[in-house]
Amino acid sequence: MSAILDEVLKANARYVDSFGSKGDLALPPTRRFAVLTCMDARLDPAKFAGLSEGDAHVIRNAGGRASDDAIRSLVISYKLLGTHEFFVIHHTNCGMEFFTNDTIRGLLGSSLETAELTSEGFKDVGKGPGSRAGEFIDWLTIRDQKQAVIDDVLRIRQHPLVPLSIPIYGYVYDVKTGKLLEVDGASEAGAAI
C-alpha cells in the first residue's frame, strides 16, 4: 500500500467516526446554486464560499473552464436538482496560464511521463513513447484570466440547454488574499433575463 493511500484511508476512517447525520442530507443542494471552479489544490470552495456538505454543487476541472462536461454538470444541476444560480470562479496564478495547446500537445507527443516546470516553461524529462491523441483536444488554456471568465460565462449563457432565467456570476479568486474579485462585464454577460 502506498503512503498516500494509507493516509487517505486513515483520514476516511476518522471522517466516518464523526459522520453523524450527514447520511440524511437531501440530494438537491439546499442553497440552490452551483460553482464551476478550478481543481487547483490552493482553492477550497467550501471555505471561500462558506459551504457545508449539502449546500451547493461544486464542479471542478483544470482552469474552472466551461467545457462541454462542465456544462453537462450544470444542466443536470439545475434541471434535475433545482439550482437557480451559477458561479464561474477562476483564480490568479493558474497553471492553465503557463502553457498553450501547442505546448501540451508537444509534451504528450514526446512522452506520457510527467513534465517539469522550469524557468523557461514546461520541459519533457520523460522517455517516449508519447501519444498524438492530445492533438485532438482543445485544452482550454488561458491567455487572459479575466477574458477567460467572461468567455466561460458567455459559453454557459449561450448554451441552448441553459435557461436565460439563471444568473451566472463571474469571479477570480486571489490566491494571495483569498478574496473573490468580480470580473467587470462577466456578471453582466451572465445576467438573468
Image: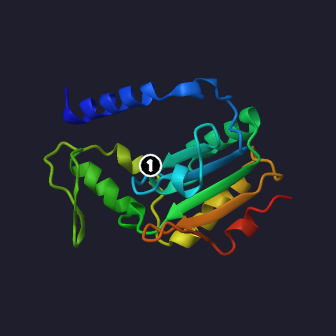
Q: In the displayed orientation, state which residue is furthest to the right.
A: 193
Q: Where does residue 177 sit, x and y in percent of width and height?
A: 47, 71
**Where is the N terminus found, in terms of image quarters?**
top left
Q: Where does residue 38 sit, x and y in percent of width and height?
A: 48, 54
**Where is the C terminus found, in terms of image quarters?**
bottom right
Disc 1 is placed on an element classified as loop
- Disc 1 residue type (three-letter): Ile
* Figure quadrant of residue 130: top left
- Depth order, front residue of 7/170: 7
- Depth order, front residue of 55/18: 18
- Depth order, front residue of 55/62: 55
Q: Dot 1: within a 10 Å radius of its alpha carbon, few (fewer than 14), some, or many (20 or more) residues?
A: few
* Figure quadrant of residue 147: bottom right
Task: Write the residue at 71% across / 44% down.
Answer: 31
Q: Where does residue 159 sit, x and y in percent of width and height?
A: 71, 50
Task: Write the residue at 19% across / 56% down.
Answer: 124
- Depth order, front residue of 12/172: 12
* Figure quadrant of residue 115: bottom left
Tell me if 124 is positioned left or right of 79 in this view: left
User: Residue 52, relative to residue 177: is it above or below?
Assistant: above
Q: Where does residue 8 sit, x and y in percent of width and height?
A: 32, 33
The residue singled out by tag 1 in the image is 137
